[in-house]
Amino acid sequence: MSLPRSVAEVLKQHVTLEVEGIDRMYLNVYQHRLQTYRGVAAFFRFHRGATFASSALMNPISKSFIAAVDCFVKQEQIPLITFTKGQRKDDITQEYRSRFNGTEGIVVVGKAQEKTPVFGTEKRRNPQTGQKYPWIVRTTGMVNHYYFYGIDEDFGPFFLKICTYFPYNAKLCINGHEYVKQQLAKEGISFEALDNGVLSCANPTRLQQLCDGLSAHKINALLRKWLARIPHPFTPQAEFSLTQVLDRPTTSRVFFEEVIRENLDIGRPDHVLLIFELRITAQTPGRFRIRVITEGVTPSLHMDYKRSRIKQYHSAA
């Protein structure tokens, strides 16, 4: 057998399998509205109902998240380890993966302290009044991160890293080669695996199709699937609406006016605040109130109960 004499000759005559696809992918996971100080301030003032935004409001969320992780690893009997500086995390977690017998699940949770962008509070002074006030600023800090190392039926090994401090940004790490190995096995196509790739495959055409089929939609589905299974700092939110269409504009206007009239005292104030019928002390958490605003021509009814809000209004359109 003669030895090849050029690169072109090697590629033309001696390649046994050629496939192109995604290798290792490291994806940022974040809530885009919480990446600026304005978005953070709006989150605490309008979503959480705080009088003013401060980093002191972040601490309870972080503590709740850490407690949820501790509870999760105990209930699921998952090892919780601490990474030290200079350790190769993949080498350490490979031991736990090799001992995992299920088809999918979180096999180990690691904790590591890393420098990362966070938000804090600095004191500023009002130039007119001289009074100090807190102001949200972007900074950096050494913060603990949780690494959730898992195995997925469709993607194989992956990990999701979540920061324990606001704004709780995360990173998802997947490997396209592991994805196609899982898919080949599920379809019963024989193949010979490399540590990070495929050495040979009984159906190279299908192998390339599987590589091409790894889409953003499937990666997004993987992320949402596991966020639903592991603890994370963000509580679910939803908005629901009930639209009632009446036969005539006049009828709908009369209906809404009567709703307001039957729930108000004597008189026609443009802004009324009603307190829920319960005993409220300085220790009562949350906000309990109903506001009826009739300013202008479109009245509206606002009801607040802790973090839940209802808004009812009339539209002539």
Image (spheres, grey):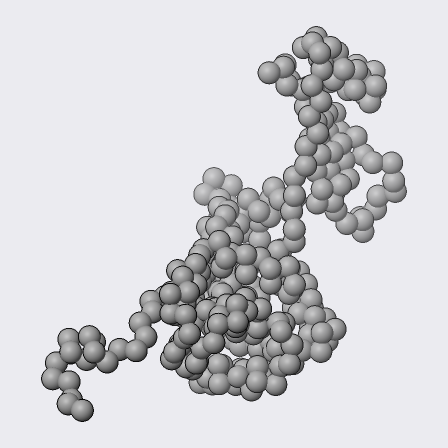
Instruction: Judge whether residue 158 can be spotted in this image.
Output: no
At x 46% / y 84%, what residue is drawn? 88
At x 62% / y 72%, what residue is drawn? 104
Rendering coords of residue 182 (x, y %)? 51, 71
Give 308 or 42, whichever is nearer the viewer: 308
Total labels drawn: 0
Question: Does 311 sit above or below residue 28?
Answer: above
Query: Where is the N terminus found, in terms of image quarters?
Result: bottom left
Query: Where is the C terminus found, in terms of image quarters?
Result: top right
Give 16 or 126, whichever is nearer the viewer: 16
Question: Does 194 sit above or below residue 29?
Answer: below
At x 65% / y 47%, what residue is drawn? 237
Question: Does 179 sit above or below residue 91?
Answer: above
Question: Does 126 sit above or below residue 29?
Answer: above
Q: Is residue 262 left or right of residue 75?
A: right
Give 129 or 276, whichever is nearer the viewer: 276
Rendering coords of residue 35 (x, y %)? 47, 53
Q: Is residue 28 left or right of residue 165?
A: left
Give the residue furthest to the left.
5
Rendering coords of residue 146 (x, y %)? 57, 71
Residue 309 occupies which quadrant of the picture? top right
Rendering coords of residue 254 (x, y %)? 75, 11
